[in-house]
Amino acid sequence: MNKREEIILDIRNMKKYYPVYKGLFKKVVGQVKAVDDVSLYVRKGETLGLVGESGCGKTTLGKCIVRLQKPTSGEMRYRLGEGEMRDILKLDGRESFEARRKIQIVFQDPYSSLNPVKTIYESFDEPLRLHRMGTKAERKEMIARLLESVNLRADYMFRYPHEFSGGQRQRICIARALCIKPELIVCDEPVSALDVSIQAQVLNLMKDLQQQMRLTYIFIAHDLSVVEYMSDRIAVMYLGQVVELASSEELYAAPKHPYTEALLSAVPTPELDRKKERIVLKGDVPSPVDPPKGCRFHPRCAKCIDICRVEAPPFRKAKGKEDHFVACHLADTEDI
């Protein structure tokens, strides 16, 4: 199987703009470019990490992938069954319903992800009924197995969300995402709201479930240590665009983009005798309503040259690297 055949999701030139209104008649005076021309792919069975500062567009991209947000433009090709890749944004009817089943999401906040007036059983049973998966007795057995798969007792299904701790709730949310047997799960900062002691348990659980069920993850986070532990490949986003994409080992060992270098310099090292030079970025993140011309990172980049201010760098393959891509005029790149 070659690399192209392994791809399960292929996003091409995706954009998500939000109109900015002003005045009594709500005239559109601009666009918030939350996701701006993003192209990337995900291979079956891997974990693709998405990192970047708050407001870079990574959560919006995740919501577009599960179609909680409708992209402004672009394609999202997905392999349905054993067939060819198809743009699921253009599907309708039964095909669209089936595609939605295959891509699920785990949200950041386990406290607001579950309906407080429904028992766990009711929250799980509803999607199973909508997708016509089994009889009532079979669905109950499915829910019991799912709870046990995330190390919770089966009789917990008759309890309400407020009766659980944060870590237990997040495990319930993971089990709910798995209940209709998806292939791809978007994990939107799934451990950031949990205590550090609980984070490791949830992350290890997710890794075990990935191996057992042959799942594919898109893992969104701002904690670079967590992303390194979970991800096979990592995409770095800045102001709505992907600026670097590489394997986890390659990115942490030899980052090519100045923004990636600055992010990695903030990761603490456990080695006491090894000091790391902290790169402090100047200024604030520019507004996504009016992003800078040229390279969007140039107002904060210490290595900025004249071409960076006037010409946007193309997203190209790093020279001599098979699966490392970067958008920077200073990087040594070659044509794909």
Image: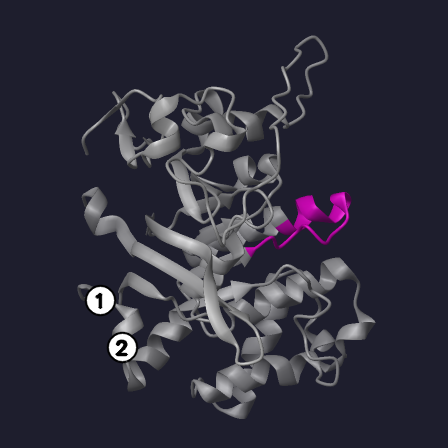
Label of residue 274 in the image: none
Question: In the rendered structure, which amino acid carries the disc numbered 2?
Answer: Leu
> Eyeballing the image, is 333 above or below 134?
above
Task: Locate the N terminus and report the quarter of the image it occupies.
Answer: top left
Query: Is the Cβ of the residue at disc 2 closer than 8 Å to that at disc 1?
Result: yes
Q: Report the residue at 45% width, 53% height from top.
A: 217
Q: CA distance from mark 2 to mark 1?
A: 8 Å
> Eyeballing the image, is 26 above or below 5?
below
Identify the residue under disc 2. 91
Identify the residue under disc 1. 86
Report if residue 194 lies within the magenta region: yes
Question: In the rendered structure, which amino acid carries the disc numbered 1?
Answer: Arg
Q: Report the residue at 46% width, 52% height from top.
A: 218
Report if residue 36 lies within the magenta region: no
- Say left or right for 229 vs 80: right
Residue 75: where, in percent of width, then height?
Answer: 27, 62
